[in-house]
Amino acid sequence: MSALRTRIRPAAGRRARPGPEEAAQRALLLRLLSLLLQYPDAELAAERPALSEAVNALPPSPAAEELASFTAWFAAQPAEALESHYVEVFDLRRKSSLYLTYYLHGDTRRRGMALLTLAQTYRAAGWSADNGELPDHLPVVLEFAALAGPRTGEAPLRRHRSGLALIHHALSDAGSPYAGVLAALLSLLPPAGAADLEAVAKLAAEGPPAEDVGLDPYSGTGFAPPGTFVPPPPAQPTLLPPLTGPTDAETRR
């Protein structure tokens, strides 16, 4: 429990506009979302009581309600069942992959550029996500959002709102409790507009753009052209940095 508290406690001291208390709670929510969307290995599974405690202590909100429901399920499952379910819904289903730029660009040259731009955004904010994971992996994007604040940190989430909505719909269709985690995240973002809804409908019907070339320097990342998609291996939970400033995330296995 102490290790988990080290990861989530720094949010309580974070100060940002419009007010330190509100910003601290929002950062804590984003950190919890990042943790809950990581692969539930033995370390994360062991921290389930502390995660439930942190969620139950949140002020009332739609996001807190969704997370409370999810953590009740999460805490009750056998560890092996959690791992199996995670692989099934996130690694083996294209429409609920956690790699956000895939939804906008598919396996195209534009996706390679989007990944580079996102990595540059992290570096410009003084944060490194060099943990062996792609910069568009949703837990990584959520960690950055918690650290950098609503304006800069949450910009990638707003940019990929249609992809997040598609993940939510896919998880809901699959009957996965993880749909509640995505619902909690979407409740923190601006409401979907007509363009967002149209983009989600198009993605659901047609899928992302397809192109076989141009993913360098990310050509060895585990993505392949549609029809031959092989998901990357699961990650171990990402350690959140201390209050003194952002640090590199914990190296994944």
Image (cartoon, rainbow, N blue to C red):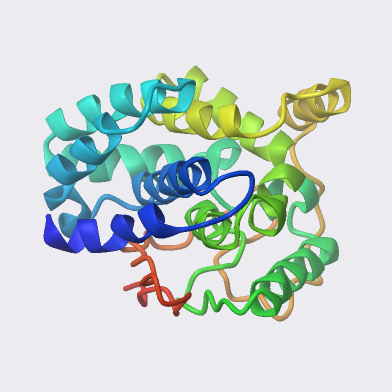
Quadrant in which residue 19 is drawn: top right
Residue 88 vertical placement versus 205 (above, below): below
Give coordinates of residue 148: x percent, y percent: 59, 62
Residue 219 vertical placement versus 25 (above, below): below
Q: Give left or right: position of 48 versus 244.
A: left
Give coordinates of residue 128: x percent, y percent: 55, 79
User: Which is more toward the observer, 27 or 86?
Assistant: 27
Of all residues, the one furthest to the front in this rendering is: 19
Quadrant location, the C terminus? bottom left
Give coordinates of residue 238: x percent, y percent: 36, 64
The residue drawn where x is 39% and y is 70% is 243
Tally the marks: 0
Give coordinates of residue 43: x percent, y percent: 17, 59
Quadrant in which residue 83 is drawn: top left
Of all residues, the one furthest to the right in this rendering is: 195
Residue 244 vertical placement versus 191 (above, below): below
Q: Give left or right: position of 123 versus 177.
A: right
Residue 228 vertical placement versus 86 (above, below): below
The residue drawn where x is 82% and y is 30% is 199
